[in-house]
Image (spheres, grey):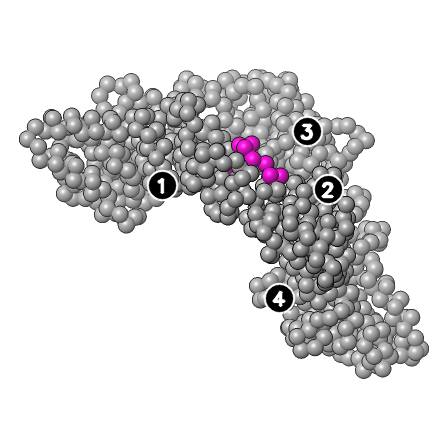
Amino acid sequence: MLASGEPAQLGLLATNQRLLSDRPDLRDRLAATGCAPVARVILGLEHARQAAWPLRARRRVLDCAGGAGWVGPEGVATALLATSDPGRLRAAVGCPVAGVARGVLVSVGGGLTRAEQLRGLLTVHDHDGGPVALRLLDGASWLRPVVAEVVRDVLAAGDAGALRKATEVAEGTDGLVEELLDGGSAEREELLGLRDEVDWGLVAASSGMFDEVAAGALVARADCPDWVRDELYRVHGVTVAERAARVDAGMFAVMPGGARAAKAVGVVARRVLDEGSGDASAPVLPAMAVLEAARPAAAVLEAVRQPSEGGGPGWEGLAGALAALVGERLGEDVEAWRAVRARLPRFAGTVTELLAASAGKQGASGGAGQAGGWPGGSAMPEAERSTTVTGARSAFLTLLDAAPAHDALLPHLDDRTVCDLFGHGRWRPEWIDLALSSPDPRHLRVLTNRGSLPTAAIDVLMRLDDPAVNARLFVRTGATAPQRERLLSGRPFNAPGPLPLDPDMVEELSRRAAGWRGRDAVDCADLELQRHILRHVRVRGIVPQLRMMLNLWERHGADQVTNLLDDEPQAVAHTRKVIRREVRAYLTKLLAARDRDAALARLRARVAEGETAQWQIAALREQEHSGNELFKEAQLWHWADLLAEHARDPLPGVALNGLARIPECPEELRAQAALHGYDQAPRKVLDALAAGTTPQELLRGGPINSDVVTWVHQATKAGQLTWDEVLECARPARRVLMVWGGERLRDPLTSLVRACLDPAPEAWVLALRMLPDFTGSVAELLRTAATATGVVLPHGAVLPHEAVLAHGVVLAHGTE
């Protein structure tokens, strides 16, 4: 398409953001065409919300301006000069269209750099009136003194050589340094992007004068040499560490500049672990480089406490290497740990040096019985939890995370460090036994205050039947709906009789307006708290509401059921009635019966039937949409039975997708939903396939509606259909590309395009012309365009009848 040079098609290509993001080189290539439709897109002139491209692309398209659509009332030049945006206008200093560069100089000349002023003047000289036009700008107040002097010299000599030379120098590194030192300029990074080559020696000579913005822009360039990066790192440590195109372990030998030197070291350490050591000649693992070369140790340990999302080999290597070092140097030697904690805040060496210096040593204040307590120790926070861990505490926590065990250490640690460890350290299941066996009861409370307490740990701790522990467990984010229901029920696991709810918890929860879940009220033992919950969250589903009424009847008697029906809480967080009318009608009938015991028995039977796995399975097989009410109901799902049923007779895709939206859904069912689930059952498609229609016949024989789209997505995931078959069979081509274009079709479509279109630019043009009205498949479209333009296709390629029509188009109109 670029070779054909058809402006309208190039303009459309310039709007394809997905393609441009995948092929960054296309931006420069499109800009180099200089055609008006492309310029409108690049300059952001198509519509008000359209963002302009970077300055480099804007300069390029304006420098190359040519062809139709540039001049006249509707031309790009007219639209550009009508704007008041200096950012758009400054890009036009090299535009050869008559009047543009001169108009820009007059409008925004005072805000242009030396290089831009000189380029604009040279453009006026070469394309818009020569020396005569240049003389009209002589003495303009907005000219920089050095530029004004060049203009005078040119006019006096009658030769533009001096102007060309001055422009070349200003557009090189000399002018770049001047621009980067202009701290008031907001375009410095974009002005740097205009330079294809940089004299890095000249840049390094000024490294001490650049501010953070300039330094960051320079090191972000892929061609910035490491030695220049290091020079700038000595001045602006954090900025360079964050923005450098690459980092390596050699930077650990450079002292970072700025007030936050320790942070700079930490940033480099994390990037080395993420990206590798960067030194191919020295096969040092990134982890070992961080531990053996980065300093100070406290900054490094604090920086690497939390691995990057997704981790990677570097982080895995660090965890293993640090664990080995800590195990070897410190182990369970309390005094060695005491020594490392005492040295940590002021130690200037590396992590390995810190551990070596502390191994087998006494703490800063003496031995095991020292009166000074744990180094850096402080009291337990009043809330028995630490909200954040920073500085030396964070660094020490990294070492604790790497420790082989905490049994010997725990009795010696200060209270705040215990809070740090149990609240923010890397989770260890053995902590539960440590906390339970500790003589200090606060250790258990600190553990239950851990925000990320795992679901499995909650399950263990709630079996202690401790109201105070349960109060903390209820507000943990890892608590499942069944766990929360049990924690509010007061039903013990081992203790005799009902378990009282913690009064402080009830008081706190009674003030809470958000964060409730559908099962929270179902078995709540406190009547007032239950009513409060019902005002803020709906108990969805008939069976869950009947279960709530059954629990209320069994715990507090039929009169409380009557009270709830007669004095129904008024919802404040939803618009529906708290009690469903079906539930109200059923309960009213039961309460009116003479034999209350028999009525209660009927309620138990009704609830028991509705809570069975068989009822749930039958209901799941009837669903037509994954957004149906069933999947929002406060059901206690029988996950083990559902997994067994799915293994016996696979559940429908709608059921899988609906179940996957439930927080407690097992990962096995989520994986099945990702493969086979869909939001709405493509009933007609499934019926057609069941009747013997092949997938290929289905794609050829009907429109691409929502059912077909749903089925294709799942069929390709499940291996029942390939994207090659979609390209070959689904029609019409335009609809196929609109619905499935992008990542899904990229690989199979790429091979087709290379075989059918890439050999001849005319094939591209013809395919695009035919696309809107072509009735065949994508593969048929591309092969038709190829054959009609003389491309030799692989042996065995089948052409549809449209090939004859396409050949006629070529003969009658050509492809220009």
Is 464 left, or right, of 810 in this rendering?
Answer: left
Q: Is residue 717 magenta?
A: yes
Q: Amino acid at mark 4?
A: Glu
**Nearest-to-viewer mark from 3 and 2:** 2
Q: Determine the image quadrant of residue 770.
A: bottom right
- Foreground tag (4 vs 1): 1
Looking at the rendered structure, the secondary structure element under dot 1 is loop
Tell me the CA gap for discs 1 and 3: 50 Å
Estimate how packed mark 1 is, as few (under 14), some (14 to 19) or many (20 or more) residues with alpha carbons within 10 Å. some
Q: What is the span of residues highlighted in magenta in the rendered image?
A: 714-725
Q: Is residue 111 left or right of residue 369?
A: right
Query: Foreground: 299 or 316?
Result: 316
Q: Alpha carbon of mark 4 to alpha carbon of mark 1: how far?
A: 43 Å
Read off the residue under disc 3.
287
- Asked if residue 380 lies left or right of residue 304, the reply is left
Q: Would you call the spot at circle 3 few (<14 residues within 10 Å), some (14-19), or many (20 or more)?
A: many
Q: Position of residue 614 (x, y in %)?
A: 31, 26
Mark sitting on residue 246: 2
Q: Which mark is residue 46?
A: 4
Q: CA distance from mark 4 to mark 2?
A: 37 Å
